[in-house]
Image (tube, grey):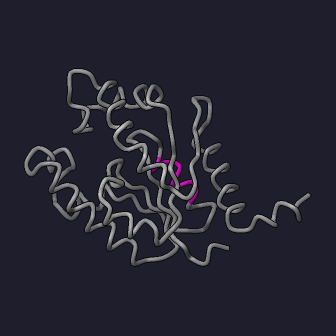
Amino acid sequence: MLNGTNIFLIGMMGAGKSTVGQLLAHKLNYNFIDTDPLIEQCAGKSISEIFADDGEETFRDLEQQVLSQVSAYTRLVVATGGGIVLRSLNWSHLHDGIVVWIDVPVEILYDRLQTESAHRPLLQTEDPLQKLSDLYEQRRDRYAQADISIMVNAEETPTDISDRLFEMINNRIDPDRLKHDH
C-alpha cells in the first residue's frame, strides 16, 4: 500500500511519538526507529549529557546525521526529536516520507512530562510549563508543514491514536478505498 515509504512522526516531547510509532509500525508491518537512542549510540552518551557537555547545537548536528542515515532505508516508522523540525535541511529528509504531526495540547504534555522532566534537558527551568508553551509556539508553524496532522485529546490511548493514524494514512493514499468499504 505504502510501497515502503517511510513515515516520520514529529511533534513535541511527550506527544507519544515512540509509543504510537511502535504500534503504527506493527500495524503497517514496518520497522520502528526512534532517533534519540540512535543519537545516544552515536555519541556514546545520553542526550542529557550531550546537552550538558556539548550543547544543543552539537545535539542538533548529531540528530541531522542520524536522520540522513535513517532516511536511506525504507519501510520505517521513525519517531523524531521534538526539535528536528527546526533545521530546514532535516525537512529535505522528512519529505522523502510521509510526515505526521502528533499534536498534543501543552497542558497534556506537561502532565505527561511531570514524572520524567529530569531527563528532558530543555525543561530544566524554573517554569517547565511556560517553557513547553514557548517551544510549542516556536515550532508550531514548522510542525504544521506535516502531510498529516492528528490532534490528540486527553482520553485517547496510544492504541486509539495509532488506529486513527492508520486510517488517516490509508485514506491519504487511497481516497477511493472508503467508498468501496461501504
Q: In the image, is 108 to the left or to the right of 13?
A: right
Q: Which of 22 and 144 is in front in this view?
A: 144
Point 72% across, 60% down: residue? 171
Point 42% across, 62% down: residue? 33
Question: Which stretch is magenta?
Answer: 17-24
Quadrant of the image occupied by residue 130: top left
Q: In which quarter of the image is the N terminus?
A: bottom right
The spot of residue 46 in percent (x, y) is 20, 50
Q: In the image, is 88 to the left or to the right of 171?
A: left
Q: Nearer the viewer, residue 71 or 114?
A: 71
The answer to if 36 sits in the magenta stretch is no
Q: Which of 151 and 15 is in front in this view?
A: 151
Point 63% across, 60% down: residue? 27
The answer to if 23 sits in the magenta stretch is yes
Q: In the image, is 130 to the left or to the right of 15?
A: left
Point 35% across, 28% down: residue? 115
State whether residue 130 is above or below residue 72: above
The spot of residue 100 in percent (x, y) is 52, 55
